[in-house]
Image (cartoon, rainbow, N blue to C red):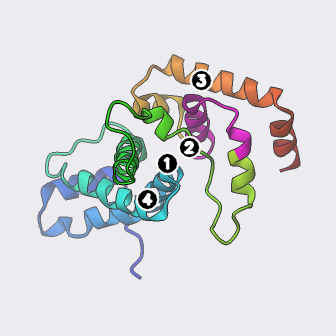
Amino acid sequence: MPPADPRPDLDLIAASNRRDDQSHGAFEALYVRHRDFVWRLALRFTQDQDLAADVLQNTFAYLAGKFPGFTLTCRLTTFLYPVVRHESLAALRARRRAGGGSAAGSGPGDDDLLADLAGPSCSPADPRGPGDDLRRILAVLPAPQREVVLMRFVDDLSMEQIAQALDIPVGTVKSRLHHAIATLRADPAARRYFLDS
């Protein structure tokens, strides 16, 4: 396997925009660098490996369609987050429709589709692993608070990056995070989980 391309994302994006001989491999380098982030996030949203694989493919197809002419104004992970979220919702909606779910507009909304948004997924070989415990702990939070907690502490995004990815004010991010942490501190199971970890 060839070594990872050392160029920063902005240089790889500039090279992908040029589409000349020197840009060869720039988009592939972006893919290799960010595919694990997209995969983990898609799996967190969909809780299904097949759907996550589709989301991964669709996310990078969307990114590829931005070239040439793509201008990055934030971290690439911040740009990709809402794309993965949107593609995951689309995949969950399609699965619900295919499974005989209710017609559009009369079934669960996006928040209901992502209500199971949880922490790091545990492997199929260890369905009761640490990810399952964290999922149960975070289940006490409303979906918007849970999402902000995961973005901040699992995805390591700053408050500003979260606000940009979710298209909400920074103050809303801070409020959701504050309320989520207060709820987790008041929950004995959450306190035990984090003290024992």
Q: Name the residue under label 3.
A: 176
Q: Mark 1 points at which residue?
A: 45
- Closest to the camera, between mark 4 and mark 3, is 4
Q: Earlier in the sequence, mark 4 or mark 3?
A: 4
Closer to us: 83 or 97: 97
Q: Residue at x 49, y 21 (%)?
A: 170
Q: Earlier in the sequence, mark 1 or mark 2?
A: 1
Q: Which image quarter is the N terminus in?
A: bottom left
Residue 18 position (above or below residue 81): below
Q: Earlier in the sequence, mark 1 or mark 4?
A: 1
* Magenta-highlighted residues: 136-156
Q: What residue type is labelled 3?
A: Arg
Closer to us: 33 or 151: 151
Q: Which of marks 3 and 1 is nearer the N terminus?
A: 1
**Element assignment for label 2:** loop
Q: Earlier in the sequence, mark 4 or mark 2?
A: 4
Callouts 4 and 3 close, C-beta under 8 Å:
no
Q: What residue type is labelled 4?
A: Ala
- Closest to the camera, between mark 3 and mark 1, is 1
Q: Name the residue under label 4.
A: 52
Residue 142 position (above or below residue 175): below
Q: Earlier in the sequence, mark 3 or mark 2?
A: 2
- Work out how far the residue at label 4 is from the one at label 3, CA to CA, in angstroms: 27 Å
Q: Name the residue under label 2.
A: 117
Total numbered badges shown on the rendered structure: 4
